[in-house]
Image: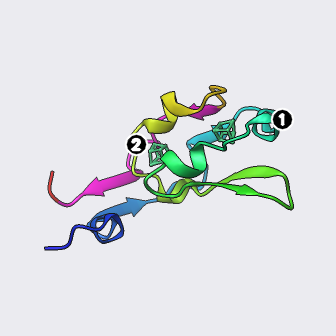
Amino acid sequence: MSDSISDKLFTIRFKCDDVSHLIIKEHANCLQCVKKDCNYFCPADVYEWEKKQKMTTVAYENCIECGTCRIACPYDNIEWVYPKGGHGITYKFG
Ligand code: SF4
Ligand code: SF4
C-alpha cells in the first residue's frame, strides 16, 4: 500500500463542471499577498502564481473539496462553493 499523496489522489474520481466553483475575488489582492499561501496549502495543487501574467491561476478540475482554501487565504480572497450537483469528486472508499 502506497503512502504518497499523489498515489492517494489516484483513488479519487472527478466529474468536472464547465464552470469553476472556485473564484479569485480580487486579483489585486494576490499581487499584494507576499507568501502566496494557496500555492502551498492546497493538497491538490489547484492554485499557482503565474509570474508573467501576475495572477493566480485556478485548476478547479483538480479540487478534492477539502475546504482548506475557504479559511486559509489571508485575504479571504477565494470564493468557494460546492460543485453543482452531479459534479465534483467521488471517493473510492467512502
Ligand atoms: S493566498 Fe489568497 S491572496 Fe494570496 S495569492 Fe492565494 S488567493 Fe491570492
Ligand atoms: S478545497 Fe482543498 S483541494 Fe480544493 S482548491 Fe481548496 S484547498 Fe485545494
Residue 19 percent across, percent down from the top left: 61, 50
Is 81 inside the magenta-drawn segment?
yes
Residue 39 percent across, percent down from the top left: 59, 51
Residue farthest along the front direction in this orientation: 35
Which residue in the protein does label 2 denote? 85
On screen, 21 above or below 14? above
Q: Name the amino acid type tagged 2.
A: Gly
Q: If you read the primary sequence from the N terminus, does the residue marked by circle 2 or circle 1 appear first?
A: 1
Q: Residues within 10 Å of mark 2 (few under 14, many from 20)?
A: few
Horizontal side of 57 relative to 46 (left or right) equals right
Q: Name the amino acid type tagged 1.
A: Ala
Mark 1 residue element:
helix
Residue ID at (55%, 53%): 60
Q: Which mark is residue 28?
A: 1
Q: Is mark 1 within 8 Å of ligand 1?
A: no
Q: Residues within 10 Å of mark 1 (few under 14, many from 20)?
A: few
Q: Which residues are magenta?
A: 78-92
Q: What is the quadrant of the N terminus in the image?
A: bottom left
